[in-house]
């Protein structure tokens, strides 16, 4: 199936996950709401601009592909988060005016700008924080997309929350994974033979002899990413994760780091979506 041809969209129909209501939101307002929900407002303007372009391009891609009466939802698992200006004000309280103005300025600077690959709208997925390298799309979702390839994102390793540990009892692990595979045998032998991508994500791991998908295991256990190690001691499993999210496309933390080092919005996007061209749609 061919990727959609580019189009400048003036609004997006968003299905709200809490109410099920479909709202038709002007494009600029929607993108500001995505940035407010998706990226810390104290990031450098160039990172906010990169987020604006990625969010707008992603929304255009989704809208062109939509076969429903809405274009996207506000659910981060399938689409991207969105909050209203009112919700942003409640979130930021005394800093609201400053942050809202800052986001609007960043968004306006790149309004209508879209990333293209080979004459078509790019699928500009992004995530919170990589493991120090982003993932190849093919390793995570099975489809090979030439601009969603593993790139260096070493700045992520310096971020708060890069490493995260979760401790779960045998009972918690067995009930979390029960739908996928019933636990049996000695708990210290439950997990084995992790196969990893070049960037470190667990592609496959054996649980009680059955080979499971690493992403599915991470999701069932509530881990921040599928780049994890597991240790077992005295009835407790300790999971250590690196990064946060699926690891494909732009790392938001990495974009923030690059902007702090003086990289422009264009440089950030060129780094995380190699081969894509930034264009202004009329």
Image (tube, grey):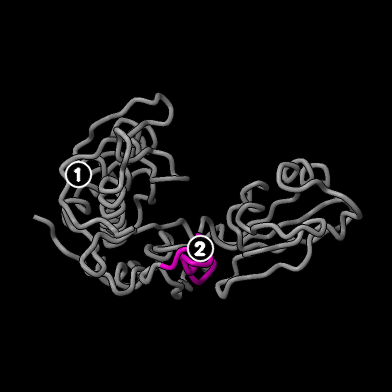
Q: Which is nearer the eye, 104 or 141? A: 141
Q: Which is nearer the eye, 114 or 131? A: 114
Taking the image as shown, residue 36 lies to the left or right of residue 188, namely left
| Rendered view: 280 above or below 81 | below
Q: Residues within 10 Å of mark 2 (few under 14, many from 20)?
A: few
**What x and y, as percent, mark residue 175?**
77, 40
Residue 142 is marked as 2
Dot 1 or dot 2: first in sequence order is 1
Taking the image as shown, residue 72 lies to the left or right of residue 9, namely right
Q: Residue furthest left?
A: 282
Picture quarter with the C terminus = bottom left
**What x and y, as percent, mark residue 56?**
26, 51
| Rendered view: 277 above or below 18 | below
Q: Secondary structure at mark 1?
A: helix
Q: Which residues are magenta?
A: 130-144
For the point 72% across and 43% down, the residue is 176
Q: Main secondary structure of the magenta part?
A: loop
The verdict on residue 66 being magenta is no
Q: Which residue is mark 1?
A: 28
């Amino acid at each position: 199936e061919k990727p959609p041809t580019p189009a400048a969209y003036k609004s997006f129909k968003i299905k709200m996950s809490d109410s099920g209501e479909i709202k038709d939101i002007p494009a600029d307002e929607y993108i500001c709401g995505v940035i407010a929900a998706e990226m810390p407002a104290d990031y450098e303007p160039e990172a906010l601009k990169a987020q604006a372009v990625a969010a707008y391009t992603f929304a255009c891609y989704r809208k062109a592909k939509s076969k429903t009466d809405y274009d996207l939802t506000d659910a981060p698992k399938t689409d991207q988060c969105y909050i209203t200006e009112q919700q942003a004000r409640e979130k930021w309280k005394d800093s609201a005016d400053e942050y809202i103005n800052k986001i609007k300025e960043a968004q306006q600077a790149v309004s209508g700008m879209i990333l293209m690959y080979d004459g078509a709208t790019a699928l500009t997925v992004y995530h919170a924080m990589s493991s120090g390298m982003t993932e190849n799309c093919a390793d995570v979702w099975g489809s090979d997309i030439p601009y969603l390839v593993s790139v260096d994102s070493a700045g992520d390793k310096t971020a708060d929350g890069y490493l995260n540990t979760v401790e779960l009892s045998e009972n918690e692990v067995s009930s979390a994974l029960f739908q996928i595979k019933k636990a049996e045998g000695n708990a210290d032998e439950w997990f084995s033979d992790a196969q990893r991508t070049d960037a470190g994500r667990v592609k496959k791991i054996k649980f009680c002899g059955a080979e499971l998908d690493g992403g599915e295991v991470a999701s069932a256990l509530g881990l921040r990413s599928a780049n994890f190690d597991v240790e077992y001691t005295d009835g407790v499993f300790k999971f250590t994760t690196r990064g946060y999210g699926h690891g494909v496309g732009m790392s938001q933390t990495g974009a923030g780091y690059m902007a702090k080092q003086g990289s422009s919005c264009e440089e950030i996007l060129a780094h995380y979506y190699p081969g894509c061209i930034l264009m202004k749609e009329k």
